[in-house]
Image (cartoon, grey):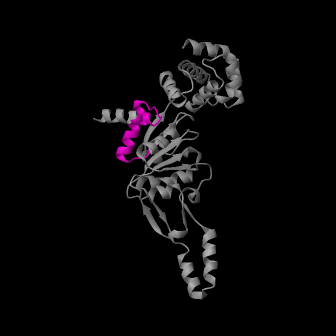
């Protein structure tokens, strides 16, 4: 029954444009069924963020995205007070005398002035379908913010000192992504189901390109996927992800190409490689050799 459910999920996700392998589909199925956060690690561009976007389309829940970065804090992630409206509220009450002003002061830290950020919106959500909370690139956040997440991921609750505790009646579907720019703490990992998202094999990448870039011919899609696979073997600083494969196929199709030729690879390398050192390494390896290997494949 479980295997059948996983395969149905694969088919459902494919219907929304995401081709998950059985391992990833199993992890998604268990995270949704067991209401556990899902931590996806892998190279940038492997399709981790797209999992959450596809889950939102599949479930019909609202996608709430928290993009992490160094220095992110509670005001950007959970809540803050609308100081401008609070000030206007006080000014409007000044003409009403001391009693009106005192009442206005008591109202300053009420929910009407609370600005809900993604984490609080995910917990204090009364929609019939739970939202999908995407905590994107958690490895970019500081250790302190990662520690702050522990309470939320354990209890699906957060405390606003002026108002009390907000707890989710139905937990959101939570997806965390990490490009592993640093190691995450064990305490965070213990609260999540974990799955490493690897680059797809060539056959699945061809299928992804055909699905996401239908304007590319079957031959072009296969050659581009094979060429990207060859580029990944060069020990690059930033190996191209699936997103770059799709972009490259679209660019070549826009140029009217139906197969890969060396001159086009030379002129469009910037679509698939984003660092000058990586482009130089690809050229040193021989673009003609990469095209021949792709054509043979």
- Quadrant assignment for the C terminus: top right
Q: Does the magenta segment cover residue 184?
A: no
Residue sitting at 61 percent across and 70 percent down? Answer: 85
On screen, residue 67 versus residue 263, left or right, reads: left
* Residue 289: image location, x then y, percent: 64, 13
* Residue 185: image location, x then y, percent: 50, 46
Q: Nearer the viewer, residue 242 or 161?
A: 242
* Residue 131: image location, x then y, percent: 44, 51
- Number of numbered callouts drawn: 0
Query: Can see residue 238?
Result: yes
Residue 138, compared with residue 47, is above or below; it is below
Residue sitting at 58 percent across and 16 percent down? Answer: 294
- Specify the quadrant of the image occupied by residue 83: bottom right
Query: Can see residue 286?
Result: no
Magenta-colored segment: predominant secondary structure: helix
* Residue 170: image location, x then y, percent: 38, 55
Residue sitting at 53 percent across and 76 percent down? Answer: 107
- Specify the quadrant of the image occupied by residue 92: bottom right
On screen, residue 60 versus residue 243, left or right, reads: left
- Quadrant assignment for the N terminus: top left
Residue sitting at 59 percent across and 20 percent down? Answer: 227
Residue 164, compared with residue 287, is above or below; it is below
Name the residue at the left extreme: 1
Provide the residue span drawn in magenta. Answer: 12-38
């Amino acid at each position: 029954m479980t295997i059948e459910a996983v395969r149905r999920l694969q088919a459902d996700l494919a219907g929304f444009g995401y081709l998950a392998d059985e391992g990833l589909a199993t992890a998604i199925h268990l995270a949704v069924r067991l209401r556990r956060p899902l931590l996806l690690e892998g190279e940038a561009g492997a399709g981790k963020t797209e999992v959450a976007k596809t889950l939102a389309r599949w479930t019909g829940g609202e996608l709430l995205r928290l993009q992490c970065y160094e220095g992110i804090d509670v005001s950007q992630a959970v809540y803050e007070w609308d100081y401008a409206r609070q000030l206007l509220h006080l000014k409007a009450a000044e003409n009403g005398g001391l009693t009106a002003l005192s009442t206005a002061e008591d109202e300053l830290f009420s929910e009407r002035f609370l600005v809900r950020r993604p984490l609080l919106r995910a917990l204090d959500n009364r929609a019939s379908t739970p939202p999908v909370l995407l905590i994107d690139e958690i490895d970019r956040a500081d250790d302190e913010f990662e520690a702050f997440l522990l309470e939320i991921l354990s209890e699906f609750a957060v405390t606003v000192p002026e108002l009390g505790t907000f707890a989710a009646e139905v937990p959101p579907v939570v997806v965390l992504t990490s490009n592993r720019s640093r190691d995450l703490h064990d305490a965070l990992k213990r609260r999540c189901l974990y799955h490493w998202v690897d680059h797809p094999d060539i056959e699945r990448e061809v299928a992804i390109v055909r699905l996401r870039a239908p304007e590319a011919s079957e031959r072009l899609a296969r050659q581009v996927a094979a060429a990207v696979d060859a580029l990944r073997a060069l020990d690059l600083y930033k190996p191209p992800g699936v997103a770059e494969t799709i972009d490259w196929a679209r660019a070549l199709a826009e140029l009217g190409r139906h197969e890969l030729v060396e001159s086009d690879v030379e002129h469009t390398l910037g679509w698939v490689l984003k660092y000058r050192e990586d482009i130089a390494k690809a050229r040193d390896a021989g673009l003609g050799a990469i095209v021949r290997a792709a054509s043979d494949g």
